[in-house]
Image: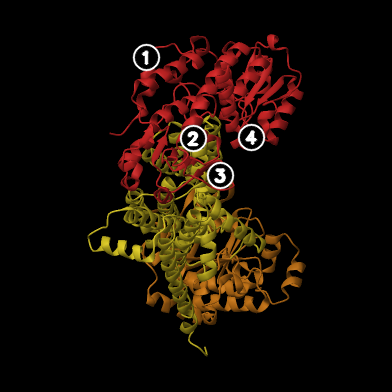
Chain colours: A orange, B red, C yellow
Amino acid sequence: MKALLSAQDLSIGYGKKVVGERIDVSLYGNEILALLGPNGSGKSTLFKTLLGLLAPLAGQVFLHGQPLKQHCRRTIAQQVGYVPQAQEGQFAFTVLEMVLMGRAAHLSLFAQPSQSDQQLALHILTELGIAHLAACTYPHISGGERQLTLIARALLQQPKVLVLDEPTASLDFANQILVLEQIQRLRAQGLSVLLCTHQPEHALQVADRLALFKHGRIEKIGTVAQVGHAENLAWLYNVSIEHVYAQLKRDLVK
Amino acid sequence: MKRRELLQGLVAGAFLLTPLARVVAKTLLEHNGTLPAPAAIERVFAAGPPAAVFLYVLVPEKLLGWPMHLAPANLAFIHPEQQHLPFVGRLAGRGSTVSLESLLLLAPDVIVDLGNAGATQRSAAQRLTQQTGIATVQIEGLLAHTPQQLRQAGALLGARQRAEELALYSEQLLARALRFADKHAQKPPKLYFARSYDGLETGLAGSIHSEVLELLGCENVAKQSGHTGIGQVSLEQLLNWQPDYLLTQDPEFVELATTASAWQSLSAVQTGRVYCAPKLPFGWLDGPPGVNRLLGVLWLMALLEGRLDGPQLKQEVAEFFSLFYRSPNSSARLLSALEPTQVLD
Amino acid sequence: MPQPASIDVNRSLPAYVKVMLMLVAALLAAIVLSLLIGKFPLSLAELWQVLVARISGEPLQGSADTVIWQLRLPRILAAILVGASLAVAGAAYQGMFRNPLVSPDILGVSAGAGLGAICAIFFNLPMLLVQLFAFVGGLFAVAAVYALASLVRRHDPVLVLVLAGIALGALLGAGISLLKILADPYTQLPTITFWLLGGLHSVSLADLAYSAPLMLLGLTPLVLLRWRINLLSLSDDEAAALGVNLTRTRLLLIIAATLMTASAVSFTGIIGWVGLVIPHVARLLVGPHFSRLLPVALLLGATFLLLTDTLARNIASIELPLGILTALVGAPFFIYLLARGGRT
């Protein structure tokens, strides 16, 4: 099978500071790949490099089999949508204005979103269940609603791949469920999703494959059944297996 | 003798018209620290440009240096002995450019400043004397007080004879100015003194920048109650004022006034009454506001009497240059100083 | 969904239209007011005659015609153009630098123009050269800041730009101070001081003839980019991930805003606070979306400066420097904004 987004022998970091080395990872069509790793393992740096926001120190990232650096920002954005962790934002744009910014990759430099772009945005907002917020200002909605807004914005890019940076961080329980459901729904619609999270149970719940990221390396990668057992999690986070069981309080894949 | 008394009376009468009338009765000098005996004063530091011009005409041999940069054009009219005086920077006023250490190195016997000092300047002078032990002298008064200023400062600095000579000349000139003012008291000419490149900056009525105009009884059209500094005006305001004459010291402005279409609506421009005063070796009408402006009195009187080109002004100017500035006298040079005088017609 | 969302979305449109209509009316009223009052007494009838005569192709002779057509109208136009330029450039910069407390001279355009103009004043050059030096100085300062910032890599480029602007601004400010010390305190220093305080008192049609096209040239990319500018107020990573070429868009914006500011400053001197405060007020009225912010800031800036300038030329028999009046109004408002959190 051909990978949508893949890294070959990738070294990541900032200038002389190397964060990760010899990373090989591929995202295939219609799957959810979850990246798990302790704090400071370099997950965000890896994501930025995969998105082309940060140049790799060595190795290459491929989009549809072509080196990422051969693409311009526009064509990358047409293929890959990015959902950062939601911030409050300096200016009070409305939710609809925020979401429409996702059309940038499909519009020329001086163009504005058309009526059909607006229809598409409203359609996506409706699907995500936040259409009633369209005229609300972004800084004044809840964290979960902001996260959904950013997902809607990424969806407006009409990408093949969605990259989510800790989509459930700092959300309440109901919003966590809401966001995870939506991610699964999107996969069902044919999208490929790459996400990272600090909550292994979320990964186990929605992901098809897991990648365990530690000390700047992808140490283990495979299906949830292959990789997602308690020993691996205990090893990954440097805790005892009892702690993993006690914390997750649910059936783990044996 | 009688004539002199009469003149003095006339000039004193002028002071009664000025806000400084009460100062005149007393001394115009204020000092901090212990002054050396007049004969012992050999080195005098001029705190600013007006004081420098004053000291240059009164006690040139005691002047330590220039507080302002003088271009070759200015220096051409300066006596050779003072041409090579160093630039030493200025003391009070808008930011000192001389350090106290270099001041001590120059070792002046006394520091002299000219002009009406405010409380800030006075206390700064006091502190300077405390710090350095050098006596400071402030010479107060306006252009009309020039004779008193010269006499009193002459007595203090050991130059009585020179001071008397200059004071007598000034008295005569000021008396002439008064007579001129009297003659035109019924219908004083309306003047506008343009400054800056756009000509829309001006010394307001009552400011030290338009003393020459007002001494001759002219009406400075730019009046603002409660404000006597430099102000900005608009061309619309000038059209409303319609001055009889536009004066300036800036040839660039004459160029502008005679070419820019909006200025053509001024009757002074239409009738060709735009005049640029010479500014060598120091400004004739202003800049610095010192005794150099006595030349402006001569010039403006000639202008208003319509004899700017006549031989009388040339002779008077030559006389002033030789008496006050002790210029290396050459008529060709004097003519070049008068060169930008008339611009129109 | 009980209600289709489109109703909610379009609710803001009539409010925006209402604001725009009010602002256009306010600007027109300000123009009429400004035409009517001035130091040269003109009756309504005279004003009407002069206007009609010139429009019908037979201009009247005399001062009234000059006052209206050569003095008041150019000055009104200049106030509108300058106010609009400063406000729009300020709005663009506040979005681009993601900071509502940024003004159009953040990249040193005013400091550069100031040094240029003051050099010309110092060397007693004629008016046209003072303006040219100011314009070139402004462009040069911003180009230097941009080049300097481009040399620094691996830092937040927006932060680097602002810091480079502050550093170069300080350097140019030192140059200005040096020239003020060296200038003739009796002739040049007042001129320098007045220039730094700004004013429209010497505006002529000739000034407008060169500056208006430059301002419009700068305004054009801002109008064309009115949607995409919004993306620059996201974080760099977000904007880039949405497909924005940040370097190119930012450069285009800087060139546009600099062109507008430099051509305004070149013949008015430094007029502060308009570019800082007006975008704020505009944002309070219609929100941060640049498609609406631009026209509202433009009209608001034009009206504000026109009214302030009308005040400046009528309040006393001399002219009050415009920079003083704009600061008198702008600074208290700025403090008020700071007090309520500096966020809109």
Q: Which disc, if any, is residue B182?
A: 2
Q: What label sits on residue C166 in the rendered view?
A: 3
Residue occupied by mark 1:
B331
Spatial CA distance of label 4 from label 2 is: 20 Å
Q: Identify the residue shown where x is 55% and y is 56%.
A: A46
Residue C185 lies, with reference to residue B163, above or below; the image says: below
Q: Quadrant of the C terminus of chain C?
A: bottom right
Q: Do labels 2 and 3 share a chain?
A: no
Whole-number angstrom distance, CA of label 2 to CA of label 1: 33 Å
Q: Which of marks 4 and 1 is nearer the N terminus?
A: 4
Instruction: Return the residue nearer the eye: B335 or B68.
Output: B335
Amino acid on which disc 3 is placed? Ile
- In space, the residues marked 3 and 1 are separated at their CA atoms by 55 Å
Q: Position of residue B201 (x, y in %)?
A: 47, 41
> Numbered disc 4: what chain?
B
Say what amino acid the circle numbered 1 marks.
Ser
| Left or right relative to C342: residue C293 | left
